Amino acid sequence: MNGQETTKHELVLEAGRMERQYWKDLWRYRELFYFLAWRDILVRYKQTAIGMAWALIRPFLTMVVFSFVFGHLAKLPSEGVPYPILVFAAMLPWQFFANALSECSNSLISNANLISKVYFPRLVVPTSAVVVSFVDFLVSGMILLGLMAWYNYVPSWRILTLPLFVAIAFGASMGAGLWLASLNVQYRDFRYIVPFIVQFGLYISPVGFSSSIVPEQWRLLYSLNPMVGVIDGFRWAILGGKAHLYLPGFGLSLGLVVLLFFSGIWYFRKMERTFADVI
């Protein structure tokens, strides 16, 4: 009209386009990731009397019990360092891993209303749950600093390698969390299985004791537990020359963590398209 042409805009829905842009969408939806992580941090301790102090109290009390049972009663070797430091160097990665499993496994169910109504890369949800557990990990690290100050223990140059082992712990937590988050949507039985996995894993992992007490002929088999390599790596970095890293076992654990991480992403992406229908 009036010499002006009307411009028409067409919306084209191209099959598979969402799949090709999935990883770009992860970046586009980063604000949702921040929101979910911050919300979970606030909600977790919102109605507790001492708030985030629970992130310090729980691992501290576990460390006290393990130090008394394994160090005082069982008289297990401590690799030449105070037993509480030996235990807490392992408690840090284990608590991170255990919390991530618990939070990830329920993350999709807890956000069912959001998942069933709005499109966004579902990978955002379990990843935010792992990040929340990582915040607890950082807070709990203050206990380790306090123990080192109390016992006048100064770490060696190996402490500079700690970020590497933190990254491995993050990969193990993310991989296992993605598997359990996906399986929990399909089979709600996993809400009862996960606490058992966490409790059982605590006792078969070298948290309250050094893995060096495991007979040499069983060390490689024992390293089939991916957290053995992660925990041994943390102790090697934190305890300095007092701890030794069993390289064949660490290599096996590292390989399993890599496999767990990428297979977790693969299975999550495979099942992701069914979440909105099943959940």
Image (tube, rainbow, N blue to C red):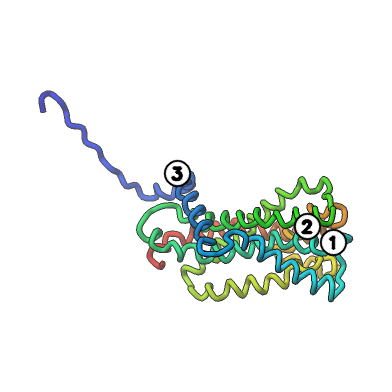
Q: Quadrant of the N terminus?
A: top left
Instruction: Determine whether label 1 and label 2 are within 8 Å by CB.
Output: yes
Gap between marks 3 and 1 measured at Cα: 48 Å
Residue at image location 84% in from the left, 75% down from the top = 74
Q: Is residue 184 above or below residue 89?
A: below
- Which residue matches tag 3? 28
Gap between marks 3 and 2 measured at Cα: 42 Å
Q: Position of residue 168 (x, y in %)?
A: 68, 54
Front residue of 74/214: it is: 74
Badge 3 density bin: few <14, some 14–19, many ≥20, Cα 10 Å: few
**Mark drawn on residue 147:** 2
**Residue 45 visible in the displayed image:** yes
Q: Quadrant of residue 77?
A: bottom right
The residue under label 3 is which amino acid type? Arg
Q: Earlier in the sequence, mark 3 or mark 1?
A: 3
Q: Position of residue 135 (x, y in %)?
A: 60, 54
Front residue of 261/76: it is: 76
Please name which of the two marks, 3 or 2, marks the residue nearer to the observer. Answer: 2
Q: Is residue 246 left or right of residue 263?
A: right
- Which residue matches tag 1? 82
Q: Earlier in the sequence, mark 3 or mark 2?
A: 3
Badge 1 density bin: few <14, some 14–19, many ≥20, Cα 10 Å: some
Badge 2 density bin: few <14, some 14–19, many ≥20, Cα 10 Å: some
The residue under label 1 is which amino acid type? Pro
Residue at image location 36% in from the left, 50% down from the top = 15
Residue at image location 65% in from the left, 56% down from the top = 137
**Residue 236 visible in the displayed image:** no
